[in-house]
Amino acid sequence: MKKVEAIIRPEAFQTLRQNLDHLGVKGLTVSEVAGCGQQKGQEGIFRGSRFEVKLYPKVKVEMVLEDHEVESIIDVITDSCTTNEVGDGKIFVSTIDEVYRIRTGESGKSALI
C-alpha cells in the first residue's frame, strides 16, 4: 500500500475532488495548511505599514491506496491541479506497512474499503 499526499492550490481542490470521485476514490483526508517554496514572499501595505507574507494557503489531500492505483492517481492530481506556474504544489508518495479499521479490527485491503 502507498500513501499519496498532495499539497495543492485551494482553488484546484473541487476539480481534483470531482476527478477522484470519477476514478472511484472513496477515502480522503483533507487539511487546510500553509507553506512556501519557490514562491518566495510578497510585500504588501496595510494601513500604511509594509509587511511580508511568507506563507501561502494550500490544501493537503491524503489517501492510502493499493500500489497499482498510484500512477493513475498521480496523473489525475497533476492534470487537475497544474497551472504551469510556481506554487502548483507537490505530491509525496510513501509506503504504508499496514492499515487497521478501528471499529471492526479489519486490516489490510479490507480496511481501506
Image: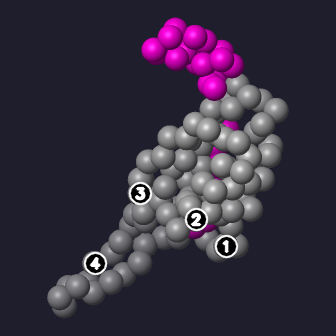
| Circle 1/circle 4 CB separation < 8 Å | no
Residue position marked by numbered label 2 in the rendering: 12
Do tag 2 and tag 1 residues touch (Cβ < 8 Å)? yes
Q: Nearer the viewer, mark 1 or mark 4?
A: 1
Residue 43 sits above or below residue 68 on the image: below
- Contact (CB < 8 A) between labels 3 and 2? no
Give yes or no for residue 14 being in the magenta stretch: no
Task: Examine the structure image and report whether residue 88 is included in the region drawn in magenta.
Answer: yes
For the point 70% across and 73% down, the residue is 84
The crowd level at tag 1 (other Cα within 10 Å; few <14, some 14-19, many 20+) is few
- First in sequence: mark 1 vs mark 3: 3
Residue segment shown in magenta = 87-113
The amino acid marked with disc number 2 is: Ala
Q: Nearer the viewer, mark 3 or mark 4?
A: 3
- Secondary structure type for disc 4: strand
Q: N-terminal of the two: label 2 or label 1? A: 2
Label drawn at residue 32: none
